[in-house]
Image (tube, rainbow, N blue to C red):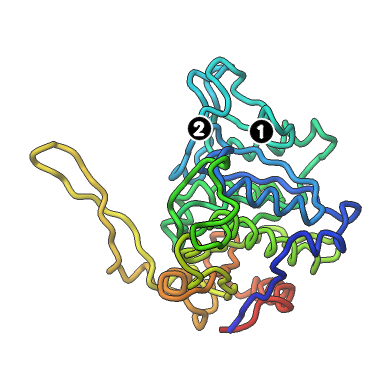
Amino acid sequence: MYLLTFSSSAAVLATFFSVVNGANILITNDDGFGTGNIREMYKAMKAYGHNVFIVAPATDQSGKGGSLTYATTANLTEDTEFGLVKAGAPSVGPDPLDDHIWYYDGSPVAAASVGIDYVLPKFGVSSPDVVMSGPNYGDNVGGFAFTSSGTIGATYYAIGRGIPAIAFSAANSASASYKDVNATTSVGLKDPQTIAGELSATFANDLIKKTKGGRVLPLGYGINVNMPDITSATSDNCISPPFVHTRMTGGAWTLGVTYNEATGLFTEREITSESALDVCINGNCYLPSETNLTSTTCKSAVTVFTIDYDAPSGEGSSTLAKIRESLEAFVIHW
């Protein structure tokens, strides 16, 4: 098995990994710039000494996949999520309290592109070293999520721009404002959003350190990370899930529709019986599926993927081996 081990405190490693050695990080998501998950990951990455920016949608843009949708008006026609910025403000701008946090009134991919081409150059950063997307509220596992998730969509957009990128998701689905993140829960543990953010930051920081100033990932490659349901709101049953190497297929799901004759409307329904969801073409078929792992264990799935969608010829196997080798110090076989 492959398991990840990590420090419990971002601040401890931050003293070692100083800002002098820090990477330029662009963080985005599809849930919005004001959510707890993204702000907690931002705080944790800053604590590690990196130069971190958030450029994310002004409002929840879940399920947008790789769509590129830009604002059609120069000003916001409604408040951003949680009322953090009011209608009438520019459609792109900084958070009133932090000029490294920006909103954009567009899809996740559009927000990522605005971050890369507009926001970061304002701060003298020609291109981020890494794009981190998420952590999403709810998991993003399997091939259907790969194409439908805005979290992953922003990731493979960045990879297509030549920028290493990692998508992060957590099974916890209760999206909330960053202002509502609690220092501790009713059982004296960290807020699940804090844990999801810190786990994601530790994963990224460990990988950045491992590459010693080089590219974090080879051209065309990305990583999809899915954490299980963090239980810290009620118990310590699952608060420190180790990271495990997985594959995208196997036990996965997709969506169909059901028509309601009375209302004349369609509603989605989950489909899990299609054999195509379990086919293994590119990956290591002996690895556990990310869907099964996160739904049945307190472990986090780490799937390496590529945006080269052609059928494999075997030429990419050495690159995949190199990526797994770079993760070897903190991810072990399950």
- Where does the image place residue 299, in percent across and percent down from the top left? 52, 73
Say which amino acid is labelled 1.
Answer: Trp
- Where does the image place residue 173, in percent across and percent down from the top left? 43, 53
Say which amino acid is labelled 2.
Answer: Phe
Residue 172's disc number: none
Residue at x-position 57% and y-position 42%: 178
For mark 1, what is the residue? 102
Residue 235 to residue 168: above or below: below
For mark 2, what is the residue? 82
- Where does the image place residue 98, in percent across and percent down from the top left? 72, 33
Q: Quadrant of residue 274?
A: bottom left
Q: Between marks 1 and 2, how big is the CA–CA gap?
A: 15 Å
- Where does the image place residue 145, in percent across and percent down from the top left? 44, 56
Residue at x-position 74% and y-position 48%: 25
Q: Nearer the viewer, residue 309 or 295?
A: 295
Q: Residues within 10 Å of mark 2 (few under 14, many from 20)?
A: some
Quarter that holds the C terminus? bottom right
Q: Nearer the viewer, residue 254 or 55?
A: 55
